[in-house]
């Protein structure tokens, strides 16, 4: 977000309750952006988030709060951190202070400590807050801020425990100078600057929401990955998440090549953050883009989160690819529509009726012995269509095309997205989650990812699998309807 003026562009008359996601977390009212304070504690996953409780446009920023035991079914809890005279509560993270290094937890046990940005018009500082009641309330520390550089663009702290050096590491950005800064601390209160990274990669106007994770490489070994959101100025416009692959020596991050890579080839994946206190690396992103986040139809709140994504890393020729996976959605299945059929041929291979509006999971493998194009087309009674396809041509690859949906138009709302595959690619695996108004797509065994909002004027009622220009076969096909999560019912 640049400045605070975005709120002025928004409106609340543009409401369509039938766009409200059914599988993705949304707050009951207000406006939500970045996931914050993602942490697992005492059997619960916590999702705090940038939240305006008073209106469905950006501004008046609090930390909203939801909890879940399975990362899918979220329960909204009372809003926690609130604006003060010192400013709004911008993005940040949370950790479990198991050994009471902070001294906040007098009984000697651990608890949650949140680290966030206090944002005034001309000053951004880092503050901490603690919770002795399993995250329900976050009490700001009495001697905040804990870091003040007299900077107006210094934000989005992400903290993790660095076991080799036995200290906390805080990763934060000097947004407009395009620097990622690394601080160290023994107690989460006194922080020392250890290193800097940048400027590097795509700069955009601001660096935002950094995260640093150590990922297993498929086939062995590990690498550190530095994740940096940029906004505005992404290749498709507005907001995007890039990452760098390299090493972290406990003080600073060094990229191992000069390549910038994007986490997602869609336009609606931003401010990705990973969970603290979990064994695998799992994170969530905000499913929108600052270029139109205040303008998309409200349901009546605005803003949704992606499904959780588990991260890994793969070496592909001379390149690195972040690998993303959806969680196993089997416990969420309401009805399996197709499993075990192997459609093949040319033209229309399959037509499947859908329960209009229900969330859908599709997993498939496709081979194109002679077809040039393979498409999954979702169609509705208004004659609108959303396509997910694979183009086997020399400039092809994966694509999403929802230009034949008419529910929302705006200058920056892009309806055609594509990802280049290696020329000659004739097999593809796809895993997609279609909810009302959002599509999440993974291909190339998780190495290609796209997240896209879409707005059709009626729900899709039919799925058509089509092979164009020759034969295609689908050796694996699984289509399942997924149950609504409780928050979709207004809870
Ligand atoms: C990213 C961001 C952060 C900031 C927050 C304000 O979307 O602009 O940099 O902390 O949103 O809501």
Image (cartoon, grey):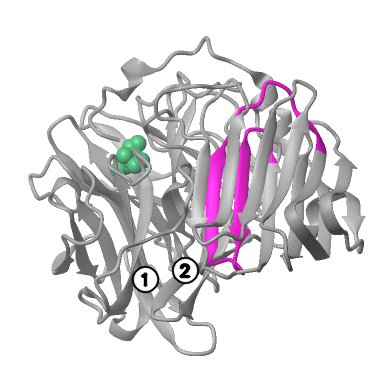
The image shows residue 140 at horizontal and vertical percentages of 32, 44
Q: Is residue 412 left or right of residue 173?
A: right
| Separation of marks 1 and 2 at Cα, in angstroms | 9 Å
Q: Quadrant of residue 171?
A: bottom left
Q: Is residue 309 left or right of residue 140?
A: right
Nearer-the-camera pick, 73 or 384: 384
Query: Quick one: SS at disc 2?
Result: strand
The segment highlighted magenta reads 435-462
Reply yes or no: does residue 438 show up in magenta.
yes
Residue contact between numbered discs 1 and 2, judged by CB atoms under 8 Å: yes
Q: Quarter of the picture for ligand 1?
A: top left
The image shows residue 22 at horizontal and vertical percentages of 71, 36
The image shows residue 117 at horizontal and vertical percentages of 27, 44
Reply yes or no: does residue 89 show up in magenta.
no
Q: Is residue 424 left or right of residue 191?
A: right
Classify mark 1 as within 8 Å of ligand 1 or not, answering yes or no.
no
Mark 1 or 2 closer to N-term?
1
Q: Is residue 471 left or right of residue 297?
A: right
The image shows residue 356 at horizontal and vertical percentages of 82, 31
Q: Quadrant of residue 267?
A: top left
Q: Which mark is residue 225?
A: 1
> On screen, 9 above or below 171?
above
Nearer-the-camera pick, 352 or 331: 352
User: At x 66% / y 57%, what residue is drawn?
Assistant: 372
Q: Which residue is mark 2?
A: 322
> On screen, 307 above or below 445?
above
């Amino acid at each position: 977000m640049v400045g605070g003026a975005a709120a002025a562009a928004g409106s609340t008359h543009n409401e369509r309750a039938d766009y409200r996601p059914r599988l993705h977390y949304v707050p009951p009212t207000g406006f939500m952006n970045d996931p914050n304070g993602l942490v697992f504690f005492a059997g619960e996953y916590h999702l705090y988030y940038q939240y305006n409780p008073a209106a469905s446009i950006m501004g008046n920023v609090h930390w909203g709060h939801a909890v879940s035991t399975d990362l899918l079914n979220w329960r909204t809890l009372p809003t926690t951190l609130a604006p003060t005279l010192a400013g709004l509560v911008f993005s940040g993270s949370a950790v479990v202070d198991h050994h009471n290094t902070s001294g906040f937890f007098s009984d000697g046990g651990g608890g949650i400590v949140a680290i966030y940005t206090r944002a005034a018009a001309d000053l951004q500082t880092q503050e901490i807050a603690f919770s002795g009641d399993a995250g329900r309330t976050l009490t700001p520390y009495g001697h905040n801020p804990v870091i003040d550089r007299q900077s107006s663009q210094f934000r989005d702290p992400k903290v993790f425990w660095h076991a080799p050096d036995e200290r906390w590491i805080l990763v934060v950005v000097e947004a407009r100078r395009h620097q990622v800064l690394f601080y160290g601390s023994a107690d989460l209160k006194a922080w020392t600057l250890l290193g800097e990274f940048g400027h590097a990669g795509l700069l955009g106007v601001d660096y935002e929401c950094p995260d640093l994770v150590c990922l297993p490489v498929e086939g062995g070994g590990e690498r550190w990955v530095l994740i940096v959101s940029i906004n505005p100025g992404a290749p498709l416009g507005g907001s995007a998440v890039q990452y760098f692959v390299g090493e972290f020596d406990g003080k600073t991050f060094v990229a191992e090549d000069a390549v910038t890579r994007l986490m997602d080839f869609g336009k609606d994946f931003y401010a990705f953050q990973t969970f603290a206190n979990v064994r695998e690396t799992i994170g969530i992103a905000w499913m929108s883009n600052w270029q139109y986040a205040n303008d998309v139809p409200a349901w009546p709140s605005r803003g949704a989160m992606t499904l959780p994504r588990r991260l890994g890393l793969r070496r592909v020729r001379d390149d690195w690819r972040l690998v993303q996976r959806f969680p196993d959605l089997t416990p969420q299945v309401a009805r399996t529509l197709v499993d075990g059929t192997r459609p093949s041929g040319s033209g229309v291979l399959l037509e499947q009726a859908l329960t209009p509006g229900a969330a859908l999971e599709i997993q498939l493998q496709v081979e194109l012995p002679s077809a040039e194009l393979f498409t999954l087309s979702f169609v509705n009674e208004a004659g609108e269509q959303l396509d997910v396809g694979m183009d086997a041509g020399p400039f092809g690859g994966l694509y999403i095309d929802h230009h034949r949906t008419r529910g929302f138009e705006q200058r920056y709302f892009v309806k055609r997205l594509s990802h280049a595959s290696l020329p000659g690619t004739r097999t593809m695996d796809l895993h997609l989650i279609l909810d009302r108004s959002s599509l999440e797509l993974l291909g190339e065994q998780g190495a290609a990812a796209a997240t896209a909002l879409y707005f059709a004027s009626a729900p899709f009622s039919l799925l058509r699998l089509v092979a164009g220009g020759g034969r295609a076969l689908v050796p694996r096909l699984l289509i399942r309807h997924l149950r609504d999560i409780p928050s979709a019912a207004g809870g």
